[in-house]
Amino acid sequence: MSKRDMKIVTWNVNSLRARLDLVLNWIEVNAPDIICLQETKTTDQEFPEDEFGDLDYDIVYFGQPSYNGVAIAARDPIKNVVKGFPGALPDDEKRLIAATINGIRIINIYLPNGNSYNSDKYRFKLQWMDNLQRFIESGPLFSSPLILLGDFNVAPRDEDIYPAYGTGEQLFISSAERDRYRQLIQWGMTDMLEHFHPDTQQYTWWDYRGAGFQRDEGMRIDHILATHTILSRSSSCDVDRGPRAEEHPSDHAPVILRLKD
């Protein structure tokens, strides 16, 4: 693995076309080594690849019109790209892309929202999480450098959701969702934002309605999970709230993991 300081980012941009200038400007200022995007909401044919190339980023993407979509951009070559779960059908939702960059396996996901608790879409969400667990277990050992990141649509602890949103068995915080999230941790990964800020409330999403961001009424649903070899190199993990305060922002903020040489 190349040894150098690195900055690795996950960001649900909620339509790349709608926020392309915001995203490109943020990349130009912050110069991440790897940035993983979710909810790009654009087909592969219409993806703005050239704009990322103008900033000297290699990029791979997996998208569909109007919904879902994931992408990975990196300053170094992107290798061994996988799009979707093994055996996925052409019309399956575009929610997962994996690649190797500088010896680190990156898995970028946009996990289903679930729509409402105990609905068909909620059950689809749980099945998708089960498929993700199998996908992780079929890949590199937990001792290998692996980062799983993206929009999980799960708030793993009570501290990760604004209290007024409620408690108990409901979407984003149900026991079934949280149990599956913990299975990923128990397999051999660390929740990096929780690791560096165990006693600090850190939200990554705020509803557009009701001035959720201005009131800081949000949820922590965007995560970076990493195996021990990444944890040992990590120096910080933080939420950049700046882009959420811009005009016409995504409802999510970037999460940034820094690795030391």
Image: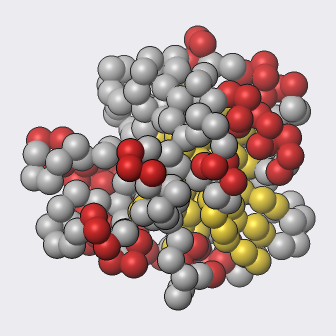
- Left/right placement of residue 156 relative to residue 170 reads right
| Coloration mode | secondary structure
- Left/right placement of residue 113 relative to residue 38 reads left
Residue at horizontal 63%, vertical 63%? Answer: 239
Residue 34, percent across and down?
74, 49
Residue at horizontal 78%, vertical 19%? Answer: 50
Q: Is residue 140 visible?
A: no
Residue 27, located in which quarter of the rendered image? top right
Q: Give the tally of numbered discs.
A: 0
Picture layout, residue 63 above or below residue 254: above
- Left/right placement of residue 260 relative to residue 250 reads right
Picture layout, residue 185 above or below residue 139: below
Residue 22, percent across and down?
71, 35
- Farthest residue to the top: give it: 45
Q: Is residue 25 visible?
A: yes
Residue 170 vs residue 150, the one in the foreground:
170
Residue 253, percent across and down?
59, 52
